[in-house]
């Protein structure tokens, strides 16, 4: 199996490597989810924390049933190792002017890198979307 793409945005859980596109396909196949972003943050000792951020369709709330549905889709379509540790609702996924999801900058922000060093807001189509990730990083 060959995974192409950036190694810093590849998910590696328990030695099983996977590109984020497979996870996005599983998550965004859930009808209540409009968009998503996943990162894998290494922790000391070789473990990692993998949060999943979802943009929900209008009028949908992220409750326990929806979290189970999302996790079930990931488990079924990828592997049990790629089920996220936590799922958070966000209003928008940060994207470049070309529409690419900002996986690496979000990972850096959640790992403690100052936001201005992780991403240039001028290069984003929706710079205000980073604010939620900065808030989450400050709480942890």
Image: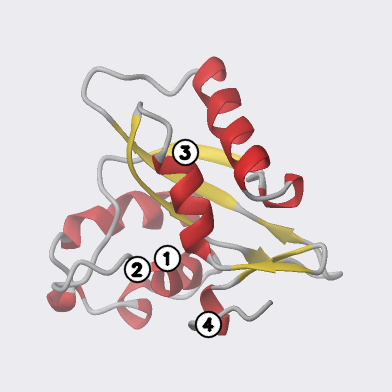
Q: Earlier in the sequence, mark 4 or mark 3?
A: 4
C-alpha distance separating marks 2 and 1: 6 Å
Where disc 1 sits, the SS reads: helix
Q: How is the image coloured?
A: secondary structure
Marking on residue 102 = 2
C-alpha distance separating marks 1 and 3: 14 Å
Residue at far front of view: 1
C-alpha distance separating marks 2 and 3: 16 Å
Q: Earlier in the sequence, mark 1 or mark 3?
A: 3
List x then y, in percent, for residue 121: 19, 73
Q: Residue visible at 36% across and 82% down?
A: 117
Q: Earlier in the sequence, mark 2 or mark 3?
A: 3
List x then y, in percent, for residue 3: 59, 78
Residue at numbered disc 4: 4
Locate residue 88 relative to residue 41 in the image: left or right: left
Q: Are marks 2 and 4 in contact (CB under 8 Å)?
A: no
Where disc 3 sits, the SS reads: strand
Residue at numbered disc 3: 88
Locate residue 37 relative to residue 7 in the image: left or right: left
- In the rendered view, tell whether residue 41 sits above or below residue 133: below
Where disc 2 sits, the SS reads: loop
The front one of 16 and 84 is 16
List x then y, in percent, for residue 72: 63, 31
Q: Are marks 2 and 1 in contact (CB under 8 Å)?
A: yes
- In the rendered view, tell whether residue 18 sits above or below residue 122: above
Quarter location, residue 123: bottom left
User: Can I make out residue 140 in this image?
Assistant: no
Marking on residue 106 = 1
Where disc 4 sits, the SS reads: loop
């Amino acid at each position: 199996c060959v995974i192409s793409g950036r190694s810093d945005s590849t998910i590696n859980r328990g030695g099983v490597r996977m590109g984020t596109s497979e996870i996005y396909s599983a998550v965004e196949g859930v009808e209540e989810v409009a968009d998503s972003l996943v990162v894998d943050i290494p922790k000391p000792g070789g473990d990692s924390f993998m949060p999943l951020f979802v943009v929900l369709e209008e009028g949908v709330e992220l409750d326990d049933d929806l979290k189970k549905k999302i996790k079930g889709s990931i488990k079924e379509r990828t592997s049990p190792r790629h089920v996220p540790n936590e799922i958070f609702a966000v209003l928008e996924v940060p994207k470049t002017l070309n529409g690419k999801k900002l996986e690496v900058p979000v990972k850096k922000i959640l790992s403690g890198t100052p936001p201005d060093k992780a991403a240039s807001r001028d290069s984003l189509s929706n710079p205000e979307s980073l604010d939620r990730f900065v808030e989450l990083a400050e709480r942890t």
